Image (cartoon, rainbow, N blue to C red):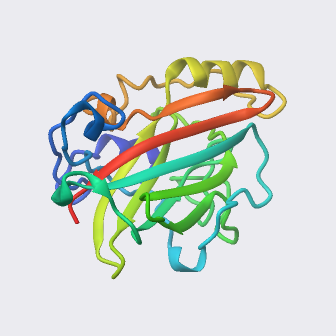
Amino acid sequence: MERKEFLKQLGMTGLLMPLFVTCKSDDPSKSGSCTVTDSETAGPFPTKSPSTLEMTDIRSDRTGVAFTIKITIQNKNNSCAALADAIVDIWHCDRDGYYSEYGGSGMQTVDMTAVHFLRGRQITDSNGLVGFTSIFPGWYSGRAPHIHVHIYNSSGQSLLVTQIAFPTSVCDTVYTTATSFYTKGKQDTSNTSDSVFSDSLNNELGTVTGNITDGYLLTKTIIVSA
């Protein structure tokens, strides 16, 4: 199956977990709302053995603009208090739009099956926080730039699969300025026309600060029912 065909089928039963009502704040608990973050597909390139990738620095040999990722997990069932000891897996593509652990097929022609870059797992601290050192993701045709997140409770039970979008202005700056890394120019799919984010952007858009020289910081609060 081609990658674009997979993207067209994101609405099929079994590929998407049930959607929840969105909210407009990056940190819904601070706006007086406490609503579970939208659930999204994990595919087509989920991490195959995430328990072996417990690490903070997930760059491996990948290069690009420095990107620090800080994700806070809150529990809807406890008035959106911080959720400690949750397991958080993230993964995203490299500067050229390729995922590790996959390839050599129509979904991704470049074979990356033997490497494990830009994938990692962390356990939330008492503030519900995890942090990763990475590079700013590139993009591939048919999707807006994004990060995948899978959250489990401390016993390993799946709580939520979701995705994080980035502000368009930041993506435009990275892709048109840091051209020694990013060679394809601006992404061909906007957040508002993306098959995943078009109906949930306000609830899945991360806050990104920084610059090309010093790197960028992504912060995002994700609410689960635990």
Quadrant placement of the N terminus: bottom left
Residue at the spot 39% in from the left edge and 61% down from the top edge: 150
Q: Is residue 63 visible?
A: yes
Q: Is residue 106 left or right of residue 133?
A: left
Relative vertical location of residue 39 with respect to residue 53 in this rendering, above or below: above
Percent of width and height locating residue 24 = 27, 27
Question: Foreground: 103 or 84?
Answer: 84
Residue 57, by quadrant, is bottom right
Residue 164, by quadrant, is top left
Relative vertical location of residue 145 with respect to residue 63 in this rendering, above or below: above
Question: Foreground: 54 or 77?
Answer: 77
Quadrant placement of the C terminus: bottom left
Residue 211, by quadrant, is top right
Residue at the spot 51% in from the left edge and 53% down from the top edge: 107
Percent of width and height locating residue 23 = 22, 32
Relative vertical location of residue 191 with respect to residue 96 in this rendering, above or below: above
Residue at the spot 70% in from the left edge and 68% down from the top edge: 115
Percent of width and height locating residue 173 = 66, 19
Residue at the spot 26% in from the left edge and 50% down from the top edge: 39
Question: Foreground: 72 or 114?
Answer: 72
Question: Foreground: 179 or 203?
Answer: 203
Q: Is residue 121 left or right of residue 30?
A: right
Q: Is residue 6 visible?
A: no
Percent of width and height locating residue 100 = 63, 61
**Number of callouts:** 0
